Image: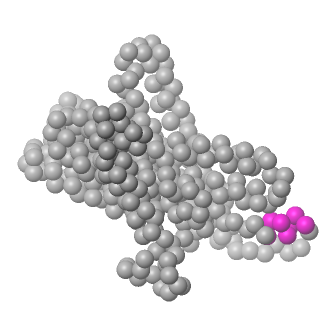
């Protein structure tokens, strides 16, 4: 059975898969933010409520970079 | 052979749900063509009106359920604006409330089966993010004049570092609308595509697809959370940028 297909498309799909490794970095970042928030909140629960908004801003900033890698994967797969 | 037939019978492409189609006929899409995006944006606006105008019509002292929801959301966004941007920021509260209500309802309506998620398109979110960016920049210059540029000149840093930090701050200022819009659109697109991927598994397995259906329910619950959090994040970043414009000194 002969292998058919386009070399460029193969490269693009491999690249899309590689781009998804960037999501792991975003996962580490979000986990770091929430973990540190929790450890701080358990030490001083009375101050935790005021910092929830800051935590969400931190999550949003680090999550955006994972979304960028998802976007690169989508561009490689669909927008050639 | 049978498996192949079943798979081809439920050939759902996960990205098909994001295709923009004209509502009537098959013609080319011009700027005035009513599409499914138009329809679902209109439904989102009607839902906002239904919740906030119809829901609070009774003005009861003991609120009904819909009035209670509307009051809770109003109080939540109001407090968030006041906490982050201060008293001066409350002048812009109607715009922030509008953004929050539209995004949260567009996101939630996109979770209905067979519906269309308007906020999964970068064209929609980029319009909102650019509006915020332009408005915040204009407000900053009108309120502070040239002192607004001190946002980029961090006076608490050591003097030799300040030019380098200024370049970084300027770049990050202009990247704001990009990350602001792509964050919302990417989250919506990724989450809804995941649901459709599991739906494709369930379709391929046929009657015995218990595991994919349980997985869809779990992902759906997660998506409910993500839609509300992303609307919250979009709104809170708007308020943070507004606060930068109103009080530029670090």
Foreground residue, B62 or B22? B62
Q: Position of residue B128 (x, y in %)?
A: 33, 58
Give the x, y percent position of residue B155.
17, 33
Magenta stretch mostly in which secondary structure?
helix
**Image quadrant occupied by the C terminus of chain A:** bottom right
Count every numbered label the image shows and give the total: 0
Q: Is residue B179 visible?
A: no
Q: Is residue B4 magenta?
A: yes
Quarter of the figure with residue B148 = top left
- Point out the image quarter for the N terminus of chain A: bottom right
At x 42% / y 59%, what residue is drawn? B44
Instruction: Report the residue at 31% width, 48% height from top.
Output: B57
> What's the residue at 27%, 58% (across, down)?
B131
Q: Is residue B35 left or right of residue B62?
A: right
Residue B189 position in % (x across, y down): 53, 57
**Residue pushed farthest bottom?**
B27
* Image location (x, y in percent) of residue B196: 65, 58
Q: Report whether B43 appears left or right of B164.
A: right
> Is B216 left, or right, of B164 in this rendering?
right
Which residue lies at the image location 58% right of the left edge and 42% below the top edge?
B222
Magenta span has B113?
Answer: no
Q: Magenta span covers which residues?
A: B2-8
Which of B170 and B235 lies nearest the eye of the viewer? Answer: B235
């Amino acid at each position: 059975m002969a292998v058919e297909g386009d070399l460029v498309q193969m490269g693009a799909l491999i690249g899309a898969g590689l781009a998804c490794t960037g999501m792991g970095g975003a996962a580490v970042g979000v986990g770091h933010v929430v973990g540190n928030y929790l450890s701080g909140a358990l030490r001083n629960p009375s101050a935790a409520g005021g910092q929830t908004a800051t935590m969400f801003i931190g999550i949003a900033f680090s999550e955006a970079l994972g979304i960028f890698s998802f976007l690169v994967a989508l561009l490689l797969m669909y927008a050639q | 052979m049978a498996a192949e037939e079943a798979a081809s019978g439920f050939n759902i492409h996960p990205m098909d749900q994001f295709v923009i189609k004209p509502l009537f006929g098959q013609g080319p899409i011009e700027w005035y063509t009513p599409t499914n995006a138009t329809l679902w944006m209109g439904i989102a606006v009607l839902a906002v009106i239904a919740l906030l105008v119809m829901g609070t019509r009774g003005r009861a002292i003991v609120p009904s359920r819909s009035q209670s929801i509307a009051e809770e959301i109003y109080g939540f966004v109001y407090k968030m604006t006041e906490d982050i941007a201060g008293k001066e920021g409350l002048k812009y509260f109607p715009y922030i409330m509008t953004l929050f209500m539209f995004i949260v309802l567009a996101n939630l309506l996109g979770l209905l089966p067979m519906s269309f998620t308007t906020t999964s398109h970068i064209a929609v979110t980029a319009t909102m993010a650019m509006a915020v960016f332009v408005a915040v920049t204009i407000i900053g210059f009108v309120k502070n004049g040239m002192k607004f540029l001190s946002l980029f000149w961090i006076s608490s840093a050591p003097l030799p570092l300040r030019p380098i930090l200024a370049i970084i701050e300027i770049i990050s200022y202009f990247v704001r609308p990009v990350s602001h819009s792509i964050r919302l659109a990417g989250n919506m697109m990724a989450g809804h595509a995941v649901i459709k991927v599991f739906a494709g598994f369930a379709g391929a397995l046929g009657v015995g697809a218990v595991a994919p259906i349980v997985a869809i329910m779990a992902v759906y619950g997660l998506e409910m959370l993500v839609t509300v959090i992303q609307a919250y994040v979009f709104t809170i970043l708007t308020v943070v940028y507004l606060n930068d414009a109103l009080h530029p000194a670090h």
